[in-house]
Amino acid sequence: MTTTPTRTEQGTLRAQREHVAHLHTYLTRYELVTWTSGNVSERVPGEDLFVIKGSGVEYDQLTWEGITVCDLDGNAVDGVRAPSSDTAAHAYVYRNMPEVNGQVHTHSTYAAAWAARHEEIPCVLTAMADEFGGPIPVGPFALIGDDSIGQGIVETLQGHRSPAVLMKNHGVFTIGPSAKAAVKAAVMTEDVARTVHLSRQLGEPKPIARADIDSLYARYQNVYGQR
């Protein structure tokens, strides 16, 4: 498997690449990333392709040309930027979880602190029940550069209601039916990681009953918002 870019720009999928470039503004707006860390990717509908942020591209310089088109083996097929160092992990998830159409990776401060402790975030807030349907789980430690992280994401999240996983000693990876949904999950992960951390400074947070978590999750996923 290789992630060497073609170093040519054919301009394919420009509208989707513009969309994904814009989604990265949420990562900086909500202070989920530092310097050039973190990325958003999105599957191309109906094709064995996805688009992902180029490696080391600064956020204030990110345009559609900073988003690279890759196949599901992680090979760059269009774009002058080498794709993210997490490309093999994203590709593995797309190959093995066909329901996933978007992914996000961040090293957001509070959530990464939980990951450093190898500790899941317990479901002690209604907002967590709504978005995650339970605790945010911890995935295995994996080195960067091949699909090991992707294997850990799939192993942890397949069959789990949470769209987020804390990879040990690393950070947050989120999945979703769209890239924007995965971005929302990343924002919510940092928000609840911070709140639960602060709660623990005051005492031990009290868990929500399983039946109530199920009820809250069903309402939020199926009734909340405009339909």
Image: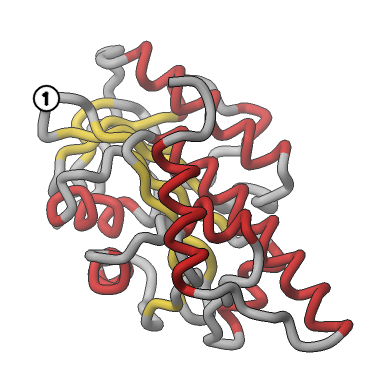
Image location of residue 214, percent across then percent down: 43, 61
Quadrant of image for the N terminus: bottom left
Q: Is residue 54 in sight in this rendering?
A: no
Question: Is 172 situated left or right of 151 in this image?
Answer: right
Image location of residue 117, percent across then percent down: 60, 87
Q: Which residue is drawn at 53% across and 28% down?
A: 225
Above or below, comparing residue 195 to residue 81 in the picture: below
As rendered, which of 15 and 131 lies closer to the eye? 131
As rendered, which of 103 and 149 lies closer to the eye? 103
Residue found farthest to the right: 202
Above or below, comparing residue 91 to residue 178 in the picture: below
- Based on the displayed image, in which of its 4 quarters is residue 203 positioned? bottom right
Q: Is residue 226 in sight in this rendering?
A: yes
Question: Is 202 situated left or right of 95 in this image?
Answer: right
The amino acid marked with disc number 1 is Gly
Above or below, comparing residue 221 to residue 125 in the picture: above
Chosen colour scheme: secondary structure
Q: How crowded is mark 1: few (under 14 residues within 10 Å), some or many (20 or more)?
A: few
- Based on the displayed image, in which of its 4 quarters is residue 133 positioned? bottom left
Q: How many labels does the image show?
A: 1
* Element type at mark 1: loop
Image location of residue 48, percent across then percent down: 11, 34
Q: Which residue is drawn at 44% across and 66% down?
A: 165
Quadrant of image for the C terminus: top left
Residue that numbered label 1 is attached to = 46
- Based on the displayed image, in which of its 4 quarters is residue 122 positioned? bottom right
Image location of residue 193, percent across then percent down: 67, 66
